[in-house]
Image: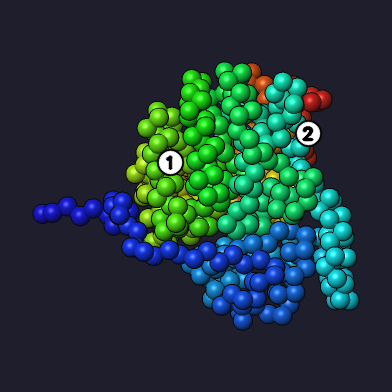
Amino acid sequence: MSLQYPSIIERNDTVQKKGHTQKYQPYFLKNYQKMPQIKRLSAQQRFDIEVVARVLPFRTNNYVVDELIDWDHFETDPIYILNFPQKNMLKPQHYETIANLLRSGTSDAEILPVANKIREELDPHPAGQLTKNRPELNGEVLKGVQHKYRETMLFFPSQGQTCHAFCTFCFRWPQFTGIADYKFAMSEIEPVIEYIRQHSDISDVLFTGGDPLFMKTKVLAGYIEALLEADLPNLKTIRIGSKALAYWPYRFTTDDDADDLMMLFRKIVQSGKHLAIMAHFNHHRELETTEVKRAINRILKTGAQIRTQSPVMKNINDDPKVWATMWQRQVEMGLVPYYMFIARNTGAQHYFSISLERAWKIFREAYQTVSGIARTVRGPVMSCYPGKVQVLGVDEIAGEKVYMLRSIQNRNPDNVLRPFFAKYDPEAVWYDQLVPAFGEDKFFVED
Ligand SMILES: *Cc1c(COP(=O)(O)O)cnc(C)c1O
Ligand code: SF4
């Protein structure tokens, strides 16, 4: 009897169709009417896009539109909702303000300041992103670096501050609006290297954005080779946060510089550093195309590991079955489930948010149905001002109904994994709505 290996992942590195390059066709407000599926959208749905996309950035592409969205049921399709602006993503008064301007034929130039004012009301920088966690080197602020947790430094390369498509829930949405004040990035790596040298506790550098894999390989390689050549003994792990596997897997297969990217990955691994691709998947559907399987296969062959994360969101993945299926499939494909987040308090949060209790129940139900191999995932987690706060559950202690919480990450390492308690509130969707339980006047995790 011969043993059949599963065909889900072809263990073959030469999957490139010779000479074939998939052409990247982005769609945004100016040209989305050109996509082949446009006739499916009613006049009202198109108008909603026109209105909402004035405030929240809109971008998708031919892979998402042709391969991921189920156009027979697009109105409830999670990937459609993930990319296409929906009327209720704006609050009614904001929607009406922009809608009225459009109806009366107001020019783009006149709409822009109104849209910018609404953006300001959407809390563009939650958790003190612009003012907190900004490190200095010799008295100068490093504009594209965040350093909140001792071991891990975030780097925002300037050329990586956009994505192959935009998630409608994105908490980094202000970066894509073209407003210079919101930008958070730098293109010089030398000060970053010096900073890592001076902070010997830093073991991880996380390239983030936007999507750093939107950058050409040449540009990314410039940064990474400098890091490797600097020969920093404390630097153990290079992480790259990316949604390219879900939004443009050709980045790893048929793009002109896909092979160079694989070579760069190999080079990192061969230098002795751990390379972790922090992949962003919101739904198991994003793992089902032939192209994403090829892409994952190629990445794993370089020796890199892929860890996965996503927020839990109404209208997209607020269903334990979706999560269990997603984690299970990820494990089958060689990926490591890492974080389930709670939707951040910015942008269209009201459209996506679910209560903390419900997020915990979804996590728990999904977790119960997968084996320990998939239980590497931690959640549900709020990435908020004091750190990464995990909701451990709801319980009654000494006659008081409470949320049990703990910090998985905290500015102060001593606060990590010490349980704390908040009053139970069935409506609470975010940390700042929580009140300490048992008559305490503050959460110690903020110290
Ligand atoms: C999530 C996060 C990290 C990484 O945390 P890990 O738990 O190590 O994955 C680092 N810095 C900031 C600001 C973060 O939000
Ligand atoms: S891929 Fe990431 S950074 Fe880009 S829009 Fe989506 S969540 Fe935001």
What is the three-letter code of the residue carrying label 2? Thr
Asked which quadrant contains residue 103, the reply is bottom right
Q: Quadrant of the N terminus?
A: bottom left
Q: Is residue 43 toward the left or the right of residue 316 in the image?
A: right
Q: Amino acid at mark 1?
A: Leu
- Judge left or right: residue 282 versus residue 349: left
Classify 74 as above or below 282: below
Q: Earlier in the sequence, mark 1 or mark 2?
A: 2
Query: Is the shortest distance between ligand 2 and the CB of mark 1 under 8 Å?
Result: no
Task: Let me know if residue 397 appears in the view.
Answer: no
Residue at horizontal 40%, vertical 36%? 267
User: Marks 1/2: CA distance?
Assistant: 34 Å
Pinpoint residue 306: horizontal percent, then vertical percent: 45, 42
Measured as percent of width and height from the top left, residue 414 is found at 64, 18
| Secondary element type, mark 1 | helix
Residue 247 image point, x, y percent: 53, 57
| Residue with the mark numbered 1 | 264
Q: Which mark is residue 131?
A: 2
